Amino acid sequence: MTAERLADYRVKARNTSESSENKIHDDAVARRYGFRGGLVPGVTVYAYMTRPLAEAFGTGWLERGTASVRFMKPVLDGEELTVSGAVTTRDERGATTALTASTASAGECAVLTATVPAGTPTPVNLALYPAAPLPAERPAATRVCLDALTTLGTPVNTYDEARAAAYLEKVGDALALYRGAGGRVHPAFFLDQANRALDRNLTLGPWIHAGSVVRHLGGARVGETLATRGRVRSLFEKKGREFVEVDLVIVAGARARPVAHVLHTAIYRLPPPAAG
């Protein structure tokens, strides 16, 4: 079949974490590590990349869709980011879409594959994801510590109308389906909470979100309280960079209804910056 193009989305990227604890978003620190400046968070780039999906598939993707995103090159504050995509297959099993995010200076910076299955999502076994308290004192993120960390502490956040409005302003998303009482939780907020599962459990130096695989399990709405349960799934090293993959389930409400399953990968330790 001929690829069915989605409408391009162009946005001026914002470094939404410039003043965060993660100093990879600070210009001076990022330059010490060999980057051109402070990195726009991967979660924010993902938020931009979801815009054509939400416009094309609406609540179908938000409730039962999947996404696999990989960040390959940094995006810097103020750069124009172009998100392009196309439906590559559409049949009785659903639709598959491939998207890229590019800048004029770096070319292709991120790739995303998304699906909208025709059937309902495969449920998760929530018993494998127990809730746990956050640590009173966060240990340093070392391989030894991560190897021994069987259960992550559970960040809990209420996504009320005020938080929704602030988050939508931060990522510049004006779609109506995310707004007002009963609006949908923005899909990038799930990855924001995946980041919190790392930095609320561990003390990290400059670190980088490398990619995520997401399954939506019904979606969540404005006004619900979200809790992120999980565990360390794997640890590996590549070109001197130390990676961690965490396996997370985000639940909503007092009855802990699963709304998203996330495999979240981060570089938790970068090679030391060059002297000088």
Image: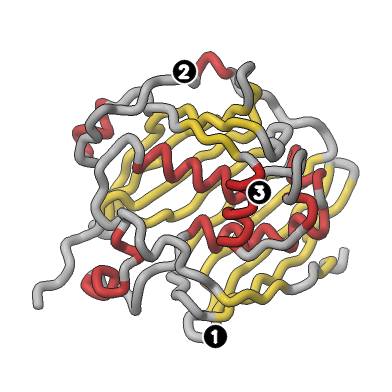
Q: Secondary structure at mark 2?
A: loop
* Dot placed on the residue nearer the N-terminal end, 2 or 1: 1
In percent of width and height, residue 88 lies at: 78, 60
**Circle number at residue 186:** 3
In percent of width and height, residue 183 lies at: 75, 44
Amino acid on which disc 1 is placed: Ala
Q: Secondary structure at mark 1?
A: loop
Foreground pick, 14 / 99: 14
Q: Residues within 10 Å of mark 3 (few under 14, many from 20)?
A: many
In the figure, 84 relative to 144: above or below?
Answer: below
Q: Secondary structure at mark 3?
A: loop
Farthest residue to the left: give it: 276
Give the distance between the C-alpha atoms of the residues marked 2 and 1, in whole angstroms: 45 Å
Amino acid on which disc 3 is placed: His
Foreground pick, 88 / 14: 14
The residue drawn where x is 63% and y is 57% is 168
* Dot placed on the residue nearer the N-terminal end, 3 or 2: 2
Which numbered disc, 2 or 1, marks the residue closer to the eye?
Answer: 2
The residue drawn where x is 88% and y is 48% is 91
In percent of width and height, residue 273 lies at: 17, 67
In percent of width and height, residue 50 lies at: 67, 58
Q: How is the image coloured?
A: secondary structure
Q: Residues within 10 Å of mark 2 (few under 14, many from 20)?
A: some
Residue under label 2? 130
